Image (tube, rainbow, N blue to C red):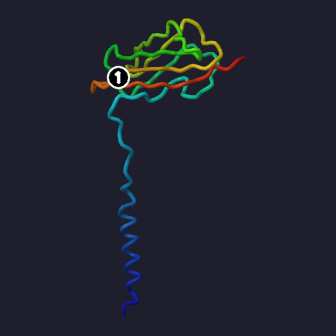
Amino acid sequence: MLAFLPRVRAFLIAGVVLATAGFVPAPAPTFHFALVKSAPADGASVANVIRVDLWFSEPPTAETVAIHIVDADGNVVPGADAKVDAKDPKAYSAVPRAALAPGGYTVSWKGMGDDGHVVRGTFAFTVPSP
């Protein structure tokens, strides 16, 4: 008489699994100012680097972005001031006076989002020898 209970239990478990299958939590949205991507990318080896581009999650507060390109000896590359892209307020670039020589470089950046928090970060890339 109780032989149907295992089938009922299996049916109930299958129903719960199917009912909850569509409820996979989505990734949490980013609510703070952050670096989304860069070119060169972190860890990249790129020849003929004539500029460094950064894209942020939101337009930074006016005149708060700073970008410094630092060579392997710790010297800041001259002339690489942060400039906003006229067509995309979330995109900034730093253009050194001359193409970067072979070697390792670190990009140090900072900016402030609408919430008033200053965010800083670094990433590195290499210009290989020809």
- Residue lying furthest front in this view? 73
Q: How far from the left and from the top, in percent, is residue 86?
A: 40, 14
Q: Quadrant of residue 7?
A: bottom left
1 over 91 or under it: above or below: below
Q: Which residue is mark 1?
A: 59
Q: Does residue 48 appear left or right of residue 21 in this picture?
A: right
- Residue lying furthest right in this view? 130
Q: How far from the left and from the top, in percent, is residue 84?
A: 41, 15
Q: Residue at x 38, y 57 (%)?
A: 22
Q: Does residue 95 appear left or right of residue 129 in this picture?
A: left
Q: Residues within 10 Å of mark 1 (few under 14, many from 20)?
A: some
Q: Residue at x 37, y 19 (%)?
A: 89
Q: How far from the left and from the top, in percent, is residue 1?
A: 36, 93
Q: Quadrant of residue 24?
A: bottom left
| Amino acid type of the residue that numbered disc 1 sits on in the rendered structure | Pro
SS label for mark 1: loop
Q: Residue at x 48, y 24 (%)?
A: 122
User: How many numbered dots are placed on residues in this image?
Assistant: 1
Q: Residue at x 48, y 28 (%)?
A: 37
Q: Quadrant of the C terminus?
A: top right
- Residue lying furthest left in this view? 115
Q: How far from the left and from the top, in percent, is residue 53?
A: 49, 20
